[in-house]
Image: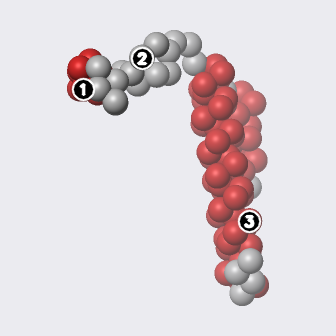
Amino acid sequence: MLILLVLWRAIMGPTVLERVITVNAIGSMVTVMILLLAFLRADYGFIDVAVVFALCGFVGTIWTLRMLAPGEWHVKVPELEELGADGGEGAVRD
């Protein structure tokens, strides 16, 4: 029942970010249901399935956000740039 409410929010959500968050929430709920099924049936092979499902959901969310979010995704750390400026073996060259 809760998945249907979240699905309705995903369809009616005014922004793309809300839709991404609700689809991620649905994936988390399905992962919990798989884990509960593994516990109730005492078949712990489902735990691997739940972990793979959760990782696929995480990677899918990151990919979707990367495609939809504008801007640069490279992290710039000033301390690391200063370390590479001396021309040593750890220097970054373009």
Q: Is residue 87 left or right of residue 29?
A: left
Lower position in the chain sequence, tag 1 or tag 2 = 1
Where 60 falls versus 64 (above or below)? below
Q: Position of residue 63 (x, y in %)?
A: 65, 32
Q: How crowded is mark 2: few (under 14 residues within 10 Å), some or many (20 or more)?
A: few
Residue 23 lies, in percent from the top left, at 69, 40
The residue nearer to you, when weighing 74 against 11, is 74
In this view, the residue farthest toward the bottom is: 42
Q: Is residue 58 left or right of residue 33?
A: left
Q: In this view, does 36 lie above or below 61?
A: below
Q: Which of marks 2 and 3 is in front?
A: 2
Identify the image quadrant of residue 10.
Answer: top right
The CA span between labels 1 and 2 is 12 Å
According to the image, what is the colour scheme of the structure? secondary structure
Between 8 and 51, the one lying in front of the other is 51
Which residue does the numbered mark 3 point to in the structure image?
49
Which residue bears the numbered disc 1?
83
Q: Is mark 3 on a helix, strand or loop?
A: helix
Among numbered discs 1 and 3, the one appearing first in the sequence: 3
| Quadrant, the N terminus | bottom right
Q: Name the amino acid type tagged 1.
A: Leu
Alpha carbon distance from label 2 to label 3: 42 Å
Q: Which residue is at 42% across, 17% downward?
A: 93
Q: How crowded is mark 1: few (under 14 residues within 10 Å), some or many (20 or more)?
A: few
Which is nearer the N-term, disc 2 or disc 3? Answer: 3
Name the residue rendered at 46%, 13% in the picture: 94
Q: How crowded is mark 3: few (under 14 residues within 10 Å), some or many (20 or more)?
A: some
To which quarter of the image does residue 22 belong?
top right
Q: Residue 91 got which mark? A: none
Closer-to-camera residue (49/30):
49
The residue pinned by badge 2 equals: 93
